[in-house]
Image (tube, rainbow, N blue to C red):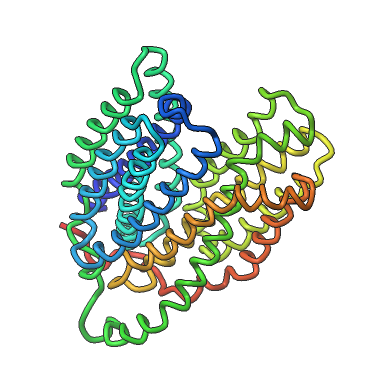
Amino acid sequence: MDRSLRTARLVTFVYFVINGTLLGMWVVQIPAIEDRTGISHATLGGLLVLLGAGSFAGMQAAGRLVDRVGTRTVVPAAGALCAATLVLPGLPRDPWTLGAALLVFGFGNGCLDVSMNAHAVQVEKAYGRPVMSAFHATFSVGGVLAALAGAGAVRAGFSPPATLAVAAAVGTVIALAAARGLLPAGPATTAETGPGSGAEEAPNRRAAAPARIWLLAALAFMIMLCEGAANDWSALHLRTVLDASESTAAFAYGTFAATMTVGRLLADRVSARFGPVAVLRQGSAVAAVGITLVAFAPSVGAALVGWALFGLGLSGCVPQLFSAAGHADPAAAGTNVSRVAGLGYLGMLAGPAVIGWLTHLVPLDRTFLLPALFCLVTAAAAGVLRTAPERPREPAEQPR
């Protein structure tokens, strides 16, 4: 294996960790920033919409930019932008400026999210085997690092601006320093050309891509809506429906997150052996079983088993969708990933709100039948991954 390719894979892990850490540092500081600005939970919820809007806009902008200039330029710039803008939410003392800060930080986060995923697709293509899920697992590692660092900063008495400024400085340095290890070629230049390469069929493939890409995006919306529902409602489910203590209720999300991380660490090997269709179909089916068990769980133990299955089943689904989008057309990999990631991110934001709205109609536990339905739809539609071009078993050309 070419040393530069191994280095590229390593630095891709670094960027995923950076993204998870930067986003996690903001999340850890939310209570202190709430107090600093004097806003209510309801106001914060509205401001988070601006964070999501900024992220969506950043994803679309970065996707197009990646296809024009390549990931080696966009990824470090996006990493530095995301890191530098992290300090902004710690500065405001009123909701208006906080909203503006979140919009800008969200834009930087979206740029980094799409560009690093587009580079991950390049690395996967060069490796000739699935490696995407492991990258997504390290994003969760970044969240753990943020939690530890944030807790340490609070104990040490650092203010939110100081904590976020330090994190921003460290993140910027690492994002720029890691740039040298990125693959030199952008998606548009990695496609083979010449007789028999299939390049002459590229116009037809690109013309057919949007319909398939939007289907992938719709599946990403449903799967990430399921993730969003678990993030915000799993602990509350144990607390309010099954009368668990607060400490026990926290295990619901912990169980879900743990099995999702483990599943993503294993999903690449499973995908290499059985194919991405099997990972998406069987994974979403397992997730459907898990969340259905949660919906009808008679006890805390049964609910925890359900949340564990839900996390394990969902773990490999999104990486398969992102990977398929990136491989569908090398000349438009960034744009395609941005479409799938953007709609998926909207699903992540919508999940908690949709479940909350449904609680006005049915009990909380029964609202989880909607995610179960989405998982079943995803399982039925998993064959869409077969339409993506075959990934090469051996890289056609090692990067220099």
Please report the residue visible at 25 percent of the width from the left and 62 percent of the height from the top: 66
Q: Is residue 48 visible?
A: yes
Please report the residue visible at 29 percent of the width from the left and 61 percent of the height from the top: 61
Residue positioned most to the top:
156
Please report the residue visible at 38 percent of the width from the left and 40 percent of the height from the top: 96
Q: Is residue 3 visible?
A: no
Vertical arrangement, residue 159 with respect to residue 179, above or below: above
Q: Nearer the viewer, residue 213 or 182?
A: 213
The number of numbered badges drawn on the structure is 0
| Quarter location, residue 56 | bottom left
* Residue 112 rendering spot, x and y as whole percentages: 31, 50
* Residue 396 rendering spot, x and y as whole percentages: 26, 68
Apparent side of residue 270 relative to residue 109 in the rendered image (left or right): right
* Residue 281 rendering spot, x and y as whole percentages: 61, 63
Q: Quadrant of the C terminus?
A: bottom left
Please report the residue visible at 21 percent of the width from the left and 67 percent of the height from the top: 68
Residue positioned most to the right:
298
Apparent side of residue 311 relative to residue 62 in the rendered image (left or right): right
Apparent side of residue 230 relative to residue 86 in the rendered image (left or right): right
Q: Nearer the viewer, residue 198 or 149?
A: 149
* Residue 317 rendering spot, x and y as whole percentages: 54, 56
